[in-house]
Image: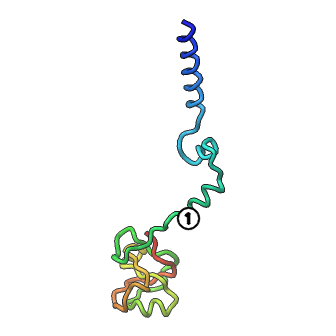
Amino acid sequence: MQLQALLICAVTALAATVAAMPAAGPDAAPALGISARDLAVRSLLEKRKNCSGSRHEDEVCGGKKLQKQNSFHNCKNSGGKCCALDADGSKGINVDLGGGSEDCGFCFSGKCKA
């Protein structure tokens, strides 16, 4: 009987501890012993996803739209860093990967981001 009461008490205490812990997410970090500084360093060290150079829909030019442009070379000479097929910046490719072709589309001041 005494062992059963002790076991019930231990299970109850464990359940209360688990219930008091925050769910996984940014608020869980302090409860798990992870500081905000550790999280910031970890995010800086993560590999960034670059554009593939194949003009996928989710590869978007950043910055401001400079002008409609045919040539990658002319876009680069006017201060552009990215060419997109669509005016909203989607289907982007960095001007360095254009290879001198004449299908830039729209020239943007920012780099391509996936």
Asked where in the image residue 95 lies, by quadrant, the reply is bottom left
**Picture quadrant where residue 8 is located:** top right
What is the count of numbered marks? 1
Q: Is residue 19 above or below residue 79?
A: above
- Of residues 4 and 67, the one drawn nearer to the viewer in this rendering: 4
- The correct choice, above or below, for 30 with respect to 46 in the image is above
Q: Where, quadrant-wise, is the N terminus in this rendering?
A: top right
Identify the residue shown where x is 35% and y is 69%. 57
- Residue 93, quarter of picture: bottom left
Side of 3 where 85 appears, left or right: left
Side of 105 relative to 1 (left or right): left
Position in image of residue 9 (x %, y %): 58, 17
Q: Residues within 10 Å of mark 1 (few under 14, many from 20)?
A: few
Q: Is residue 13 above or below residue 57?
A: above
Give the amino acid at mark 1: Leu
Q: Secondary structure at mark 1?
A: helix
Q: What residue sits right under mark 1 in the picture?
A: 45
Q: Position of residue 100 (x, y in %)?
A: 37, 92
Measuring 59% from the left and 23% from the top, which residue is drawn there? 13
Percent of width and height locating residue 70: 37, 90
Determine whether, in the image, residue 114 is placed left or right of residue 79. left
Residue 65 x/y as whole percent = 48, 80
At a point 51% along the width and 82% down the height, the residue shown is: 109
Is residue 70 shown above or below 1? below
Q: Quadrant of the C terminus?
A: bottom left
- Tell me the residue at 60%/32% (across/down): 20
